[in-house]
Every structure is written in C-alpha cells, then in structure tokens.
C-alpha cells in the first residue's frame, strides 16, 4: 500500500513543484521588468530635469548679454543662480541611481536656443520669457509626476523640493509675459 501511495503522490508532487517553479520564474521576471521600468523612469527624470536646467541656464546667460529690460535681466540673473543650485542638487540626488545628468541639450531644445540667438530687442525678450514659461511649465509637470509615481527616494525628495521653486519661476515668467 505504501508503494501504491508513493507512485500516485509522486506525479502530484512533481506537478506542484513544477507549478511552484513556474510561479517563481514569473515573479522573478515581473520584478526584473518592474526594476528595469524603474531604472528607465529614473533615467528619463534625470535627463529631462538636467536638460531643463541646462537650457534655462544657457538662455538666461544669453539674456544677461542681450536684454535691455531691467526686469528680464533680474529674472535671468535669478535663474542662472537657481538652476546652478538645482543642477547640483540633481547631481547629488542622482548619485547611485544609475542615471547620469545630461551635459548637452536635446535637439528640440538646441533648436529653440538657436532660434533665440537670432533675436534681439523686444523680440528677444518675448521669446526668452516664452521659452522660460514653457521650460518651467514642463518642469512642474515632470516634478509632480515623479513626486507621485517615482520610486527613487532621493529623486522624489528633490522633485518635492523643486515644485515650489519652479512654480515661483513659472509665475514670474508668466508675469513678465504680460508686460
């Protein structure tokens, strides 16, 4: 009877072991997939945030050279300082995440900067302020999304810290656009 029990339970145990093995493999694959997605999210966040900092800084330096408006000059000066600090904070938060900050703008932002370089006077000021409003609006969305959906604690803390700063910069750009 023991022999009969062993022959009938052995295939059952094999099926259970096979099911458990398949479940473990599925779990490992889903964790690996989620981990890869998290890494892509971190890279996307760091890349987009650093490009925003680069472009805001480069355009603001150009504005310091080109504008004759005291209000635009003050805004540009504030942005150069603020985005240098933001970039340093981003580099610190990104350390160890596997994401590296960008050192060059992407093609779209480079084209925007090139177009701005071709302007002067009031046209320059209007284009510069419009660019800054767009950059800061996009940054607000980026930070809010990462605050809600991001998985890296240091990057999430940075996003939370940057929201009120970026919101104030965006509002200032909007105010300048009205004048």
Image (cartoon, grey):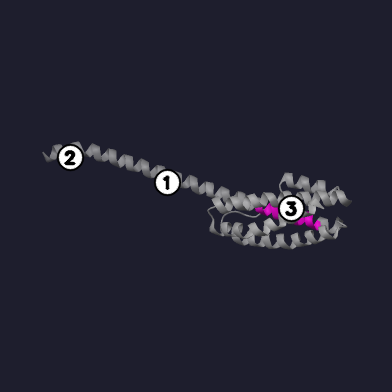
- Residue 107 lies, in percent from the top left, at 73, 44
Q: Main secondary structure of the magenta part?
A: helix
Residue 86 lies, with reference to residue 8, above or below; the image says below
Q: Residue at x 72, y 48 (%)?
A: 134
**Disc 3 designates what residue?**
55
Identify the secondary structure beneath mark 3.
helix
Q: Is residue 53 magenta?
A: yes
Q: Residue at x 85, y 60 (%)?
A: 70
Residue found at the very far left of the displayed protein: 1
Q: In front: mark 3 or mark 1? A: 3
Q: Residue at x 34, y 43 (%)?
A: 21
Circle 3 packing at 10 Å, graded few (<14), some (14-19), many (20+), is: many
Taking the image as drawn, is residue 151 in sight? yes
- Residue 91 lies, in percent from the top left, at 63, 60
Identify the secondary structure beneath mark 1.
helix
* Image quadrant occupied by the N terminus: top left
Relative to 81, is 11 on the left or the right?
left
**Disc 2 designates what residue?**
6
| Distance Cα–Cα, label 3 vs label 2 | 72 Å
Identify the secondary structure beneath mark 2.
helix
- Residue 47 lies, in percent from the top left, at 64, 51
Q: Return the disc, 3 or 1, that comes first in the chain's sequence.
A: 1
| Distance Cα–Cα, label 1 vs label 2 | 32 Å
**Disc 1 designates what residue?**
28
Q: Residue at x 61, y 56 (%)?
A: 159
Magenta stretch bounds = 49-61
Relative to 154, is 166 on the left or the right?
right
Please report contact status of discs 1 and 2: CB closer than 8 Å, yes or no. no
Circle 2 packing at 10 Å, graded few (<14), some (14-19), many (20+), is: few
């Amino acid at each position: 009877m023991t022999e009969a029990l062993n022959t009938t339970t052995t295939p059952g145990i094999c099926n259970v072991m096979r099911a458990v093995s398949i479940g473990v493999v599925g779990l490992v694959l889903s964790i690996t997939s989620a981990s890869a997605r998290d890494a892509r999210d971190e890279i996307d966040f760091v890349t987009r945030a650093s490009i925003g900092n680069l472009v805001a800084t480069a355009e603001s330096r150009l504005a310091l050279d080109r504008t004759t408006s005291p209000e635009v000059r003050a805004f540009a000066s504030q942005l150069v300082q603020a985005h240098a600090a933001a970039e340093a904070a981003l580099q610190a938060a990104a350390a160890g995440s596997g994401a590296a900050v960008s050192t060059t703008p992407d093609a779209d932002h480079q084209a925007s900067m090139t177009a701005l370089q071709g302007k002067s006077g009031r046209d320059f000021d209007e284009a510069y302020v419009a660019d800054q409003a767009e950059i800061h609006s996009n940054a607000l969305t980026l930070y809010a999304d990462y605050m809600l959906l991001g998985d890296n604690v240091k990057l999430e803390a940075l996003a939370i810290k940057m929201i009120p700063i970026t919101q104030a910069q965006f509002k200032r750009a909007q105010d300048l656009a009205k004048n």
